[in-house]
Amino acid sequence: MSSRIYLVDDHAIVRDGLRALLEAGGHQVVGEAADPTVALAGLISLQPELLLLDLSLGNRSGFELLEELQRRRLPCRCIVLSMSAQPRHVAEAVRLGAGGYVLKGSSRSELLAAIDNVLAGRRHLGPDVAELALQGLTAGAEPDLLAELSPRERQIITLVVKGLSSAAIGEQLHLSPKTVDTYRSRLMSKLGVADLPALVRFAIRAELIDADGN
């Protein structure tokens, strides 16, 4: 089944390899981007049938783009192609509407099969990924994810969910607002959350704050 595909990955060499693989499989790559903002504009203007999306995009996150696709109700289907085998990331991608999740270590045939399945309206999670999704949807994953954060990132997540601005956080921690924004984007990517409300929900479940924000 031939399709028009848009690629989002922050490494040009990866996009080049994917383009060659996909075109050899009979698909057409109509555009590519390295960050969510450029990608969203391309998806709106080019209207591809399928998006292949990495989750780690420098200081940005692929979850941002998934959320925009859902919010704008764009008809483009999506497969996440990521190095991340974190259960939380798989579960969050599925929750935000991804039709498939393929690990970057997978074979060419696995990726092409995922594309065929998702284009046909079926969800594609390989056996290992399906187990990761199940783990991510069960309670109790927050402490493991918190362990991935640096002490500085833990400071910042607590202040962010309490409603402090980047400028206020920067003043308190003696950092520039831009540096705070970088930390925030990085920790949200690690935790697999797409926006501030999701970050607050995570913080409550992890007991970083209570339901009143204290």
Image: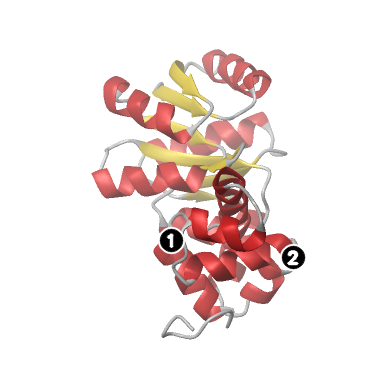
Q: Secondary structure at mark 1?
A: helix
Q: Is residue 98 above or below residue 154?
A: above
153 and 43: which is toward the camera:
153
Amino acid type at circle 1 is: Leu
Mark 2 crowd level (few <14, some 14–19, many ≥20, 10 Å Cα)? few
Residue that appears at 62% across and 51% down = 183
Residue 97, image x and y in percent? 39, 51
Question: Where is mark 2, residue-wise?
Answer: 151
The dot on residue 196 is 1
Q: Is residue 26 above or below residue 165?
A: above
- The image quadrant that residue 156 belongs to is bottom right
* Disc 2 versus disc 1: nearer the observer: 2
56 and 76: which is toward the camera:
56
Q: Judge left or right: residue 140 versus residue 71.
A: right
Q: Quadrant of the N terminus?
A: top left
Amino acid type at circle 2 is: Pro
Residue that appears at 64% across and 25% down = 11
78 and 121: which is toward the camera:
78
Q: CA distance from mark 2 to mark 1?
A: 20 Å
Q: Earlier in the sequence, mark 2 or mark 1?
A: 2
